[in-house]
């Protein structure tokens, strides 16, 4: 099936359930993104800062760019002028940097806290306690240019559907708890970003509001998954 067919099919399947489709275009050329764009897709996810900045510069301005991969503090400045949502906030230090560059650009940047739910140690994210600690911190209370609009999680890379379901269920439960404790009066805290090509059906069943789909739209990537997150050569 073509990219156009895939977008139409997925939009129909997912958006009728009131779930947002994030087309994950990492490693894919701008021509592929344009094809998806012409089929009506407006939200694209990338996991590398430089790649996203280059694509943003050459593509239509009404595209909403979502950063879904690990973000290093020293790279925040490159995406702060245009990024629409950062899914991968995994430390207060990073959030502080996002706040700083959001202020410099005169904007408020929407963010998700990435929560560690997988049974693997290669993935980034905050533990449940760490997320709560961050939200409670005085430092966070003073940040005026970031807005936490929800949580993001990546389930284990396993065939075991029961396990995936439990991991998504945990994220949904944490979301409800955090909503009650910290955002009761804020309607903007409403997003749960969970689900990829292999598990988005389970994620939607468990309450996902945003699915991040690459393979099922653009076909297999030549470069393996999570390239960026495994590259520790320039860690903070
Ligand atoms: C690559 C990636 C996806 C998309 O994965 P597919 O299997 O291609 O659907 C989703 N989320 C994150 C964080 C990713 O890095």
Image (cartoon, rainbow, N blue to C red):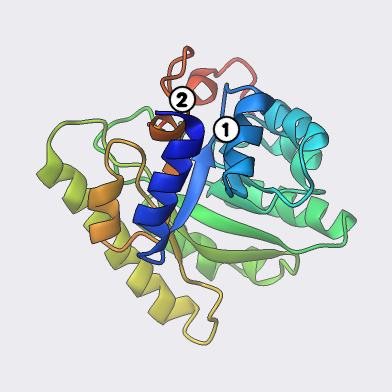
| Residue drawn at x 44%, y 64% as measured from the top left | 132
Point out the tag, 1 or 2, that comes first from the N-terminus.
1
Residue 121 seen anywhere in this rendered image of the structure: yes
Question: Splitting the image into four quadrants, where does ligand 1 fall?
Answer: top left
Asked if the beta carbon under badge 2 is closer than 8 A to the nearest atom of ligand 1, the reply is: yes
Mark 2, residues whose alpha carbon is within 10 Å: few (<14), some, or many (≥20)?
A: some
User: How many numbered discs sit on the rendered protein?
Assistant: 2
In the image, 220 versus 231, the foreground residue is 220
- Image quadrant in which the C terminus is located: top right
- Image quadrant in which the N terminus is located: top left
| Residue drawn at x 46%, y 18% as measured from the top left | 221
Q: Secondary structure at mark 1?
A: loop
Picture quarter containing residue 217? Answer: top left
Is 71 situated left or right of 88 in this image?
right
Q: Which residue is mark 2?
A: 226
Is 79 situated left or right of 33 in this image?
right
Q: CA distance from mark 1 to mark 2?
A: 8 Å
């Amino acid at each position: 099936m073509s990219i156009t067919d895939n977008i139409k099919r997925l939009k129909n399947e997912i958006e009728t359930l009131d779930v947002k489709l994030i087309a994950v275009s990492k490693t894919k050329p701008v021509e592929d993104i344009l094809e998806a764009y012409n089929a009506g897709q407006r939200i694209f996810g990338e996991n590398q800062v430089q790649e996203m900045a280059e694509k943003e510069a050459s593509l239509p301005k009404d595209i909403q760019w979502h950063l879904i991969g690990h973000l290093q503090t020293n790279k925040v400045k490159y995406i702060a002028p245009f990024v629409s949502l950062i899914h991968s906030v995994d430390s207060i230090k990073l959030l502080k940097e996002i706040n700083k560059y959001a202020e410099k650009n005169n904007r408020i940047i929407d963010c998700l806290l990435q929560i560690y739910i997988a049974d693997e140690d290669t993935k980034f994210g905050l533990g449940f306690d760490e997320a709560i600690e961050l939200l409670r911190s005085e430092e966070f209370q003073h940040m005026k240019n970031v807005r936490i609009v929800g949580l993001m999680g990546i389930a284990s890379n396993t065939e075991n559907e029961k396990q995936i379901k439990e991991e998504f269920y945990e994220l949904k439960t944490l979301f409800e708890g955090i909503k009650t404790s910290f955002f009761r009066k804020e309607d903007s805290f409403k997003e749960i970003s969970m689900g990829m090509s292999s598990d988005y059906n389970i994620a939607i069943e468990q309450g996902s509001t945003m699915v991040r789909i690459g393979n099922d739209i653009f076909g297999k990537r030549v470069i393996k998954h999570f390239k960026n997150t495994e590259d520790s050569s320039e860690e903070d």
